[in-house]
Amino acid sequence: MIPESLRQAAEAVLRRNDRGKFTAPSPRQYPHLWLWDAGFAALGWAALGDYERAYREIRAALRGQWRNGMLPHVVFYDWPSAYFPGADVWRSDLAPEAPTELPTSGITQPPVLAFVVEILTRYDPDRGRAAAFRREAFPALYAYHRWLHTARDPEGMGLSVLVHPWESGMDNSPLWDAALARVPVGDLPPYRRADARWVPEEQRPRSADYDRFLALILHLRSHRYGESGVRASPFRVYDVLFNALRHRSEEALLAMATALGEPTGEIEGWLAQGRAAFQAYLWDPERRFFLDWDAVAAARIPVIAAGGFVALYAGLATPEQAHEMVARDLTNPEAFAPDGGTRYLVPTVSKAEPGWEPRRYWRGPIWINLNALIAHGLRRYGFTELAEQIRADTFALVARSGFWEYYDPRTGEGLGIGDFTWSAALLLAWDLLEIPETR
Ligand code: DGY
């Protein structure tokens, strides 16, 4: 149960950030629709009992869908704004597959929508409305996952490749340091970042990262966001968090297809491929952890990041692998667990990583979405006490500091932008994320 004062405060954040058509992650810092943020926001609306509003959020995200199936990571509702890089940089109008009436970015973000829709339609008390929405959303979600398995699996790995760190959602994680360092910056046009206006610069990505973020956009744009740009991208990574969420979403897609009486064979094939690929390419038998695969370097990325634990949310670890990751890393004070220096679970990367920075965006702070996914993954494998510990830590962070974008794991101080939508939404919707089989 969520304490009433926190519930009210969380609801107030959602209502303040509600733009009607969509919920801004933060009206100042992120004034448009972001893909995985929209999924988490929808869960928050459902937890408040407003399923109509939750469905509207999903519809707003799906309206940005490209004709090839891609769901873009930003849909530029309410454009123009001060956000950088805006629609004028992305230029989705150059892509033959982009919607003509609505500007979007040209890359995607972690695929959470299918499992979110499955949750919404499982809990909606109006069963007729739930069935109708499932029928409405299913084709678009299916088309998105088919795109993830075709356009984004050029090497036939059974995994989806990312061509920009923003596709991982973990923009400046130490995971990308070596891969980004190889990205040629070339002659970038002069540009001005807008992200450090409301957030101290030392909590945001570095300028060298931004140069590469922009260079990668320009590369993809020069290929009109087509498949040639994917194949020629200087950044090509198979990420554990992204692919685990893809798998969890495909479990949900299978449940929806079954409920709708649709064929299930292709989805079952995707699930089998994903399971095999996680074991063949992402499990590192020496480090005993799921590691990202860098396709340009043809090597695993030797960085222990919290996204690895999200493999448990998708049921992709064997019970032995789950036990090893928990014993060796999650409960180890030299890696993720609290010690004299840190007080809360789960820092974004292991404290043992040389790139760990406890206050800088995705390089060490705690994020509420990862905490929720990790806690429910632990429950899936029977680690109920540890799951409860993460829940208690998360609620303590919010009670102490409010609904921040991320938190310093040493002090619990809120960092980034305040009144952040998914921090509020996921506190409300924490229990909705539970995997049905663990009940
Ligand atoms: C940002 O602008 O920081 C976003 O995370 C990119 O999508």
Image (spheres, helix red, strand yellow):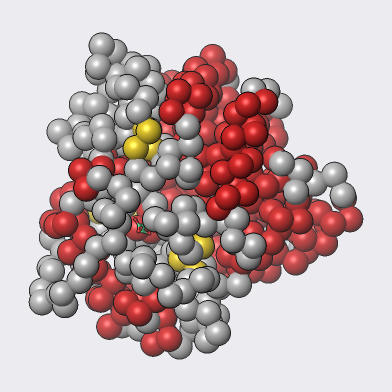
Q: How many marks?
A: 0
221 over 205 or under it: above or below: below
- In this view, the residue in front, 258 or 61, is 61
Place of residue 124 in the rendered image (x, y in percent of width and height, measured from the top left): 80, 46
Place of residue 142 in the rendered image (x, y in percent of width and height, measured from the top left): 63, 65
Q: Quadrant of residue 228?
A: bottom left
- In this view, the residue in front, 183 or 154, is 183
In the image, is 360 to the left or to the right of 162? left
Extreme-top residue of the structure: 340
Q: Quadrant of residue 278?
A: top left
Ligand 1 appears in which quadrant? bottom left
Q: Which residue occupies 27% across, 83% down?
A: 222
Q: Which residue occupies 17% across, 64% down?
A: 211
Q: Taking the image as drawn, is residue 85 in sight?
A: yes
- In this view, the residue in front, 320 or 401, is 401
Q: Taking the image as drawn, is residue 255 in sight?
A: no
In the image, is 218 to the left or to the right of 182? right
In the image, is 93 to the left or to the right of 212? right
- In this view, the residue in front, 165 or 407, is 407
Place of residue 1 in the rendered image (x, y in percent of width and height, measured from the top left): 68, 23
21 over 15 or under it: above or below: below
Place of residue 153 in the rendered image (x, y in percent of width and height, measured from the top left): 41, 65
Q: Which residue occupies 36% across, 67% down?
A: 82
Task: Quarter of the image for the C terminus: give it.
Answer: top right
Q: Which residue occupies 26% across, 53% down?
A: 196
